[in-house]
Amino acid sequence: MSAPAPEQPAGSGVPVVPSSGPPVRWPDQQAPVMPQAKTPIGAGRITVVGIALAALTGALGVIGVHDGLASGGIIDGRSWIDSGIDTFDGLKPSWWAVPVGVAMVLAGLWLLTVAVLRRPRTAVALTSRTGVFLRPADVRKLAARAADDVDGVTSAQVSSSRRAAKVTVVVTGDDGRIGQDVQDAVAERLAALQSPPRLTVKTRTGVAP
């Protein structure tokens, strides 16, 4: 006599494991969906600004340590801060102050712009629920392999960005259809991308290097 089927626990969401036999998975149960990954992004120009500010902060720290040691009589020499103040003390208004002031204002506006700019994306998204991405170098490899598989193509080179790709192929003989065949093959291979790049195909008759 077979054992009765186990009842599904209300709200448990876990497959029931009977005392004997395989686990029972109810039809309405679904596997958990992975959260979508974030788009890979680069560091951007703000990295250069951060390095410059870090170097400036380090230099100010060195000046502070030197002046502290000089004030305490631990080392000989005059305070660098006092020397700098004496250098600029007594300066009178000059013509060069205006362009210097304008340059400082422009530099400040540039720093603000860099700080709020969105960092550049470093990958191309595939059509996927979990967020799968390809680097531009991988997209070029896919396009080159697709072009190489076309009959009559002896070699293929691809240069691309996130929005456009240029495919240059060397063919044994151009009958007017190889270029279109290459474009169709590459477009089919890159169709999995959410935003396929704009393709340009250039054919050249010759022997592969």
Image (cartoon, rainbow, N blue to C red):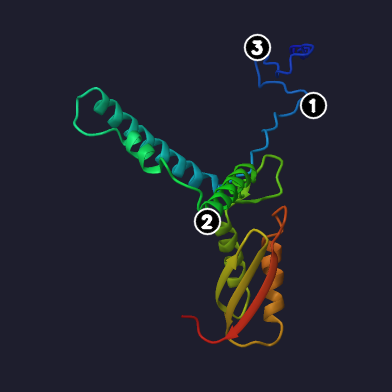
Residue neighbourhood size for the residue with mark 1, other residues' Cα within 10 Å, grouped as few (<14), some (14–19), many (≥20): few
> CA separation, marks 3 and 1?
20 Å
Which residue lies at the image location 69% right of the left edge and 72% below the top edge? 183
Which residue lies at the image location 55% right of the left edge and 55% below the top edge? 99
User: Callout 1: helix, strand or loop?
Assistant: loop
Q: Is residue 90 above or below residue 165?
A: above
Q: Position of residue 144 (x, y in %)?
A: 58, 67
What amino acid does circle 2 point to? Trp
Q: Return the residue nearer the eye: 169 or 83.
A: 83
The image quadrant of residue 6 is top right
Which residue lies at the image location 64% right of the left edge and 79% below the top edge? 202
Residue neighbourhood size for the residue with mark 3, other residues' Cα within 10 Å, grouped as few (<14), some (14–19), many (≥20): few
- Tag 2 near tag 1, CB within 8 Å: no
User: Callout 2: helix, strand or loop?
Assistant: loop
Q: Is residue 44 above or below residue 198?
A: above
Can you identify the residue that label 2 sits on?
95
Q: Nearer the viewer, mark 2 or mark 1?
A: 2
Can you identify the residue that label 3 sits on?
19
> CA separation, marks 2 and 1?
82 Å
Residue neighbourhood size for the residue with mark 2, other residues' Cα within 10 Å, grouped as few (<14), some (14–19), many (≥20): few
Q: Position of residue 60 (x, y in %)?
A: 38, 35
Q: Position of residue 198 (x, y in %)?
A: 71, 66
> CA separation, marks 2 and 3?
93 Å
User: Callout 3: helix, strand or loop?
Assistant: loop
Q: Nearer the viewer, mark 2 or mark 3?
A: 2
What amino acid does circle 1 point to? Pro
Q: Position of residue 42 (x, y in %)?
A: 56, 47
Q: Return the residue nearer the eye: 138 or 185.
A: 138
Task: Work out whether mark 2 precedes mark 1 in sequence or the reverse, and give the earlier one.
Answer: 1
Can you identify the residue that label 1 sits on?
27
What amino acid does circle 3 point to? Ser
Task: Work out whether mark 3 precedes mark 1 in sequence or the reverse, and give the earlier one.
Answer: 3
